[in-house]
Image: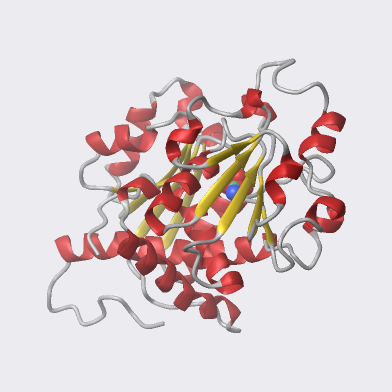
Amino acid sequence: MKLQHLFGIAQLNKEQIHYLINMGDAFIELSKRPIKKAPTLRGKTIINLFFENSTRTRTSFEIAGKRLSADVINISASTSATSKGETLLDTAQTLAAMQPHVLVIRHSLAGTCEFLAEHLRETAIVNAGDGAHEHPTQILTDLLTLKHSIGDVAGKTMTIVGDISHSRVARSHLLAAKILGYHVRVVAPKTLLPSKVENYGCEVFHDFDAAIAGSDILYMLRVQTERLTSNCCFPSIREYHEAYGLNKKRLARANADCVVMHPGPMNRGVEIASDIADGAHSRILNQVEHGVAVRMAVLTAMCDLRFNAHDLPSNPDKRGTL
Ligand code: CP
């Protein structure tokens, strides 16, 4: 699979998405072993460069790399030289000069990864979330979780609820839905919807109760208060929860086997009630578990390209074993 960089779901076709999901599926078993180690990425160097906070994505990239025997280095904005005034590009070029195979980058600005890739031609770049643009590995994680929960996602209805306008996860799902053939409903107050969102081919609702019936997946989003201006978007957290929070009464209107997802971090009692987050329909921790496996698959795909380009053809241990 030719994958020089992973900027977003938009660059992938159906076969590439299924390839990564299926490889991730094969990697799940590794994390259940007593000794969680395979030599697949032995000799590879991966740098996680995070300019925004992260628990799930950063940790799962680190665990994924380490379980596959890569050398993994984590750098956050507060400990990088950008805090002394160095530009993003200088920081990235400095790290690239140390010859990592993959740079995993999270940044608040949309397009950061494409921008850096233009300057760092020899380093594979993976987007770990850029502004409100894309979060491709989260979507691959969700799709692997859905493969286990409901099988083929084609023809299914995913209802995404909450802060659509600031959500890279919502945007990536809207793009993935077109490629894989699932149907998306977006639900939000007008103040949290991007203009012309219907151009993505989704149904648009402002009334959550009207959108629930027929949903196979309820995908709840956090209100991204760090990206909102003050006094923006809704009167109060209590009123937001009343209008857009998922509770037992609302879940009862969905399909009986409806699954509940959330990319995290979640705000219990705001977009989702605790008993739903911890309940039988929830797949939230499955998403986290599968995040490690999918990131193993993505790192393997990225490193394979580097291997093909630079390694000796006689090396018999190209991929290692699972
Ligand atoms: N889903 C997600 O990106 O979570 P983190 O911000 O914790 O990485």
What is the quadrant of the C terminus in the image?
A: bottom left
Considering depth in this image, is 169 or 49 the residue closer to the camera?
A: 169
Q: Horizontal placement of 83 versus 162: left or right? A: left
Note whether 179 is above or below 233 in the view shown. Answer: below
Q: Residue at x 38, y 33 (%)?
A: 112
On the question of residue 238 being in view, the answer is: yes
x, y percentage for residue 144?
A: 51, 66
x, y percentage for residue 55?
A: 63, 49
Considering depth in this image, is 195 or 47 the residue closer to the camera?
A: 195
Q: Residue at x 45, y 78 (%)?
A: 26
Q: Residue at x 52, y 79 (%)?
A: 30
Q: Residue at x 59, y 70 (%)?
A: 150
Note whether 244 is above or below 262 in the view shown. Answer: above
Q: Horizontal placement of 209 versus 318: left or right? A: right
Q: Horizontal placement of 79 versus 133: left or right? A: right
Q: Residue furthest left?
A: 313
x, y percentage for residue 89?
A: 33, 29
Q: Horizontal placement of 284 versus 126: left or right? A: right
The way the protein has been coloured in the rendering is secondary structure
x, y percentage for residue 166?
A: 57, 31
**How many numbered badges does the structure rendering display?**
0
Considering depth in this image, is 89 or 15 the residue closer to the camera?
A: 15
Q: Quadrant of residue 277?
A: bottom right
What is the quadrant of the N terminus in the image?
A: bottom left
On the question of residue 93 being in view, the answer is: no
Q: Quadrant of residue 255?
A: bottom right
